Amino acid sequence: MTVVKSKTEGSRTSSKIGCTKICIAAVMFLVFYIVSELRSSDSHTVVKLDPNHQLLQSKFSMRSLMGNNDTECREVRKTNHSEQCDFIRNTDDCALDEGFIDYLKFTYCNFNSSLRPLALIILFVWWVFLFIGLAVTADDYFCPSLTVISKTLHLSHNIAGVTFLAFGNGAPDIFSAIAAVGNAKNGDAGLAFGALLGAGVFVTTVVAGTIAIICPFDAMQRPFLRDVIFYLGATFLTFTVLWQKEIGKIEAIGYILLYVLYVLIVVIGRYFYQKKKKTTVLAEITVSPEDTENLDESYPNSVEISREDLGEGKPLLPPREDQKREPGTPFEEFLSAINPIDVDEWSEMKWYAKGYEVFKSPLVFLLIITIPVVDYREENHKWNRYLNSLQIFTGFTFGSFATKVGLETIGGSFPVWVLLMVIGLILSIVVFCTSKNDVQPVYQPALAYLGFVLAVVWIYIIANEIVNILQTFGIVFNISDAILGLTLLAWGNSIGDLIADTVMAKQGFPRMGMSACFGGPLFNLLLGIGIPFTIGTIKNGGTYKIKITVEEVVLVSFLMISLLTSLVVVPLSKFRMSKPYGILLIVVYIVFLIVAILAETGTITGDINP
């Protein structure tokens, strides 16, 4: 959830978020590398043997490992450097399930052991690039499409907020979970659970605590209790699933149904609240100024809520205050539209913002030419005749190859990608011939539906690549998927929430930021587990076996501790979000990190997979 005040401020905030992500990722990468080196120095103790015997033993061990289909890919660390590439190529657990690039082969087969750190640095830079692309796709292409769709379907702001816009905000988390479950080997979905639960712990402690410290305020009682109780119930359901070490089709669908129940309660509760509020507003009109001051003191929440909630006709996304410039020729407008760098604000950007713009520009260019965007905040709803016509053709072509549907054939001979290219070309010509340069056509909202589909495709393939890179890091550094999920993946998806929600608190909207701290992660957990595991249970015949570690137990336990802390402390404080409450939440997160690290290093153990 973000507040857009102007194009300049939006670009600066985006640059700060991007640079913060890069710094955090760089620190974590360095920590993982150091931990990996320390582990490898401890585990590579060589027993002196006869050279011939040691060579024969190594060859026998290598053959036995590669010949066993149950061998985990992490065993590659125990093989000789000269044999690691063959191990990766011949071990089933190392095979690529989803995605386009095999990062394990890239690391172990294209670089020898002395140059392997260079391969990891390249992967790290590529991972940061993809993470930024994931955020840009969700914010600039996915959310505007959902806004148009909700308006064309005549949905109220209330329903749109808890459905389409919530889905837009949580898209990176949800699609990362789908990719993580889809790429899980032998039921090891630790990356998905680590990201969803880790982000939940981070947002409900660090982000919520920071808001309470920066701007203490009185919380709205009903929405706070509703969100925390629902979130606590979803977390307990997740704990039950992990304890059983399997999830059935009914349980997976139950997550989705629980979200539907949450939406119904929000909508119904909002309906009755609006009826009550109208009576309150009429009463406010008849009272004197002195009585109004007394009313404000007695009920500080009611007056502020009335002012915020009045007017269902306000836009779902705040308007942009773009600088007006003289329009050029249609071709000049086209060239300006496909430019991935914001030239209007370039001169005012800091050096790091300029670097960020240049760094993300290749992927932004590809997004521009493949995803049509309908944005009600822009002039002519961002209509560009040349660009939109091109996007229809490139969108169909990109979608056919990205989803690999285009690689199929019709009748065993006619490629599907050719058919989709022809359809895209015909539609592109039709749009170009039936529209004008300066006026958007009546069918422009239909482009938002195409943009929505293409944005989903982009988010999904980027999420797949991110998950594959993280799994490669896990194998190289010998770090569990759960730890990677609760750190790199969770922090990467949550740092935007930290900055955006704290900015809202500083601007005088702490309630909005605090609501996002519980409502957003709740949405991500319910659909982030419900959707991928529903797909997984259908593929696996109704049941999906889950392999868990101590880290997952620590994650779900501390998420429940965080929510119980808020559920107990806030009502006892008369729903006052105070600085001591914020400090307590941050302490909970610090303790959580310490316990998670102790569990990862084996200091804390438990027999949870007998």
Image (cartoon, rainbow, N blue to C red):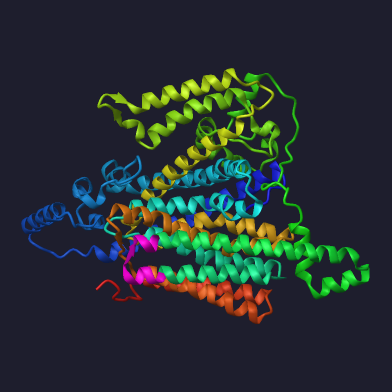
Where residue 432 sits: x, y (%)?
57, 20
Q: Is residue 265 left or right of residue 91?
A: right
Residue 286 appears left or right of 235 = right
Q: Quadrant of the C terminus?
A: bottom left
Where residue 565 sits, quadrant-wise, is bottom right
- Establish if 322 lies above or below 519: above
The outermost residue toward the bottom is 572
Task: Choose top left, top right, bottom left or bottom right for residue 181.
Answer: bottom left
The answer to whether residue 369 is left or right of residue 342 is left
For the residue pair 281 and 324, the one nearer the viewer reads as: 281
Instruction: Indicate the position of residue 577 as horizontal and vertical percent values.
Output: 67, 73
Instruction: Tell me which residue sits at (58%, 35%) in the image.
Output: 373
User: Magenta segment, principal secondary structure?
Assistant: helix
- Tell which of 125 and 193 is nearer to you: 193
| Residue at image coords 51%, 35% | 450
Residue 17 in the image: x percent, y percent?
A: 59, 51
Q: How many marks?
A: 0
Where are the magenta residues, as a range? Answer: 239-252
Q: Is residue 31 visible?
A: no
Residue 285 in view in this figure: yes
Horizontal side of residue 106 vs 559, given as left or right? left
For the N terminus, give its image quadrant. bottom right
Is 53 within the magenta?
no
Up the image or down, 8 lies above or below 332; here it is below
Check the image and report above or below for 485 versus 244: above
